[in-house]
Image (cartoon, grey):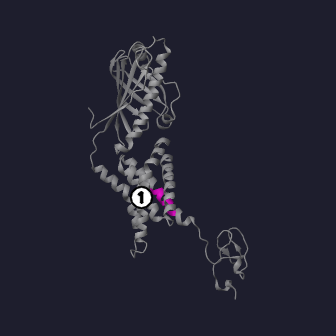
């Protein structure tokens, strides 16, 4: 008696789809079979590997992108966003994926790329910030993946009937709980001050003249600035007297500054009164200044200072990247000014004065605005 009489299901040997008993062929790829020849079909569904990793992977990536968006829109730029979110979605991946531990670790790295891609696609971060997030997420993701995997092993033989979904809900809720706690904790205003100096082969008068055009830097910016910051296009307004307002137009946005102190050939200070540069969630610019220090015949040291309010926490995590970006921006601006100043005829530098060098930058942190 044939297996057909028993009504057993038959699966295609080529694609694994269910075979049509009436047509005696695969309903998907049309491969024929003989119901009386068990070698032409299978009575067991094919083992499909993706079913053991893809559902958990997709759930983790979706949860990570959604929780990041919700916490980001809440305005909390701290542990909930940069620690709880990656721990959460990687723990979901480790708990919900039926694969070996090293395979799950590999999937967690791919999950970082998936979450970052969605964050950038939703315009919650630019390309540079997305790449930075990928690096920051790496350690919390490994921790969360190990946590989810260990909990799965601990509960796999348990009789607890809610073990299949309740731990996943708790992992998914982690960023929202941490965010709620952070909102209850007052955070002091954190102001960073960064200074960068460069020596020009120019007189103070020539260096001062170059300050008037410092937003109009013509040489190509380094790759870091192309990725991290909008590119300046032009400046509108005057800087000839205290109270003057200058509007700096960027590729995507603008910055409005007001002169607060002006000493000819010595110092120019300004405060930022408007900022629309698409990184307001990260930092708020406060003020800045240029100081000129004569260094001998035909040499002037120009010191550029920027003060900003840091919104990203913890400070130790973001401070190195912030310093690198601002220091690179300062160097680009000062180099443009130096080139402009040195185009004019200048006296030869004093041979007793040491060669020009870029000064190390200084970072200071204040607890509140003065």
Pick whichever, 145 or 182, lies toward us. 145
The residue beneath circle 1 is 144
Check if residue 6 falls in the magenta segment.
Answer: no
Q: Is mark 1 on a helix, strand or loop?
A: helix
Q: Residue 367 sits in which quadrant?
A: top left
The C terminus appears in which quarter of the rendering? top left
Provide residue 11's location: percent of width, then percent of height.
65, 74
* Residue 155 vertical position relative to residue 63 in the rendered view, above or below: below
The answer to whether residue 215 of the structure is visible from this angle is no
Left-right relation of 211 to 41:
left
Q: Residue at horizontal 46%, vertical 43%?
A: 129
How many discs mark residues in the rendered view?
Answer: 1
Q: Residue at horizontal 38%, vertical 59%?
A: 173
* Residue 243 vertical position relative to residue 116 in the rendered view, above or below: above
The N terminus appears in which quarter of the rendering? bottom right
Pick whichever, 303 or 30, lies toward us. 303
Provide residue 223's location: percent of width, then percent of height.
51, 35
Crowd band around label 1 with a 10 angstrom C-alpha radius: few (<14), some (14–19), many (20+) = many
Pick whichever, 324 or 236, lies toward us. 324
Check if residue 58 falls in the magenta segment.
Answer: yes
Residue situated furthest front in the rendering: 352
Q: Give the range drawn in magenta.
A: 55-63
Provide residue 112's location: percent of width, then percent of height.
48, 52
* Residue 148 vertical position relative to residue 31 in the rendered view, above or below: above
Q: Residue at horizontal 42%, vertical 51%?
A: 68
Provide residue 356's location: percent of width, then percent of height.
43, 21
The prevailing secondary structure element of the residues shown in magenta is: helix
């Amino acid at each position: 008696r044939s297996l057909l009489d028993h009504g057993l299901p038959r699966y295609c040997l080529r694609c694994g789809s269910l075979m049509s008993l009436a047509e005696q062929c695969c309903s998907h790829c049309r491969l024929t079979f003989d119901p009386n020849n068990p070698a032409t079909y299978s009575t067991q569904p094919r083992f499909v590997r993706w079913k053991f990793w893809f559902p958990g992977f997709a759930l983790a990536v979706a949860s990570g992108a959604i929780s990041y968006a919700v916490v980001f829109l809440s305005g909390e730029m701290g542990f909930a966003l940069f620690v709880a979110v990656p721990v959460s979605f990687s723990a979901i991946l480790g708990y919900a994926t039926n694969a070996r531990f090293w395979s799950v670790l590999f999937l967690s790295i791919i999950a970082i790329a998936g979450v970052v891609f969605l964050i950038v696609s939703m315009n919650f971060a630019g390309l540079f910030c997305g790449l930075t997030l990928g690096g920051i997420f790496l350690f919390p993701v490994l921790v969360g993946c190990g946590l989810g995997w260990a909990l799965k092993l601990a509960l796999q033989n348990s009789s607890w009937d809610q073990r299949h979904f309740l731990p996943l809900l708790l992992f998914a809720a982690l960023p929202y709980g941490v965010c709620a706690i952070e909102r209850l904790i007052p955070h002091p205003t954190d102001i960073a001050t960064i200074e960068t100096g460069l020596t020009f082969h120019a007189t103070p008068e020539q260096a001062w003249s170059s300050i008037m055009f410092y937003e109009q830097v013509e040489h190509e910016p380094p790759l870091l600035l192309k990725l991290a910051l909008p590119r300046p296009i032009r400046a509108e307004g005057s800087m000839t007297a205290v109270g003057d307002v200058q509007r700096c137009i960027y590729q995507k946005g603008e910055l409005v500054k007001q002169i607060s102190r002006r000493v000819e050939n010595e110092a120019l200070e300004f405060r930022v009164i408007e900022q629309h540069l698409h990184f307001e969630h990260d930092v708020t610019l406060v003020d800045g200044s240029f100081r000129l220090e004569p260094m001998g015949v035909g040499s002037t040291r120009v010191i550029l200072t920027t003060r900003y309010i840091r919104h990203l926490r913890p400070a130790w995590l973001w401070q190195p990247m912030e310093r690198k970006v601002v220091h690179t921006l300062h160097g680009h601006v000062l180099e443009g000014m130096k080139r402009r100043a040195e185009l004019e005829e200048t006296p030869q530098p004093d041979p007793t004065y040491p060669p020009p060098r870029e000064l190390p930058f200084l970072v200071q942190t204040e607890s509140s605005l003065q």
